[in-house]
Image (cartoon, grey):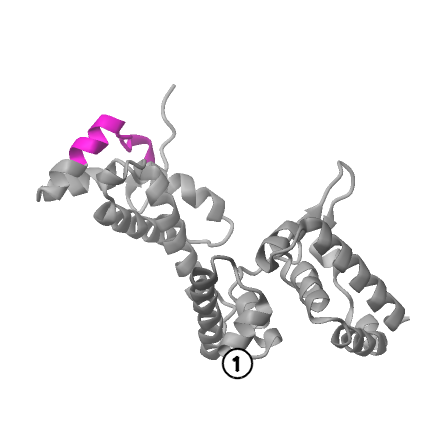
Amino acid sequence: MAKHKVEITGVNTSMIKVLKSEEMTDLFIRYKNGDIKAREDLVNGNLKLVLSILKKFNHRTDNMDDLFQIGCIGLIKAIDNFDLSHNVKFSTYAVPMIVGEVKRYLRDNNSIRISRSLKDLAFKALKAKEELTNQDGREPTLEKISEHLGIDELDILIAIDALRDPVSMFEPIYNDGGDTIYLADQLESKEENSKNWDITISLRDALSKLREKERQILINRFMVGKTQMEIADEIGISQAQVSRLEKNAVDHVKKMVK
């Protein structure tokens, strides 16, 4: 059976060579010893790895040629920084670097622009999160990041959320074999939302009257989307305690909103 020919930036993908483990090791040794040709062979021998990664992004752009080139940049960076002494498969090391390069490109070239100030705040928050994790040995709560930076929790939450990939309104969110429910089906209309402004005010008032730990649990569960187990690990209590506190907080909010 003839191989199917697909060309991306002039590369016939059906003719791409896949390197064996022994060949990879030999080429890396040669490259580290100054053989530039070995680097070229490593790139050409791993192009199918790039293509396999791009499959998950093919709905995000109309120009796969550009995305392929960006993926190759990530591949080259991985080759240049790979260390055989770590005893890790090259693909294991390279995939996150290629994915990261592609995601950065898509984010920076997205038609939905995020303000520089919002990006800066998000990166500050992520850096603070990493520092506090290293300092305390566990992931910090949103409250602790807020205190560390001296910035309101909601502002931090909005900034971090802005870095997430946009989702289509017609993204399927549930299908039990029958009718598919799309994200658009779950969005409120402006008319309906304006009728419920009083509920929104009551909800904010109810949240402000919760104990701090309960408020943090509700924010992390229903705004950030974390699991009870993740929250339990962060604040140093059991999952059962998180569940109980969450239930008490939800019951309290329901009474206040009524």
**Tag 1: Cα neighbours inside 10 Å, few (<14), some, or many (≥20)?**
few
Q: Which residues are magenta?
A: 12-27
Residue visible at 25% across and 35% down in the picture: 45
Q: Is residue 192 above or below residue 64?
A: below
- The secondary structure that most of the magenta stretch takes on is helix
Q: In terms of image quadrants, where is residue 41?
A: top left
Residue visible at 36% across and 54% down in the picture: 66
**In the rendered view of the protein, which quadrant contains the C terminus?**
bottom right
113, 95: nearer the viewer: 95
Q: Is residue 12 visible?
A: no
Percent across and percent down for residue 99 are 40, 50
257 left or right of 227 in image? right
- Name the residue furthest left: 34
Q: In terms of image quadrants, where is residue 26?
A: top left
Percent across and percent down for residue 219 are 68, 65
Residue visible at 20% across and 29% down in the picture: 23
Q: Is residue 115 above or below residue 249?
A: below
226 left or right of 201 in image? left
- Name the residue furthest right: 258
Q: Tell me if residue 158 is in the magenta stretch.
A: no
Q: Is residue 213 above or below residue 91?
A: below
Percent across and percent down for residue 88 are 31, 37
255, 38: nearer the viewer: 255
- Name the residue furthest top: 1
Q: Tell me if residue 21 is in the magenta stretch.
A: yes
249 left or right of 126 in image? right
Q: Is residue 102 above or below residue 250?
A: above
Percent across and percent down for residue 242 are 71, 55
- Residue type pointed to by label 1: Gly
Instruction: Look at mark 1 in the image and give the residue it sits on.
Output: 150
Element marked by disc 1:
loop
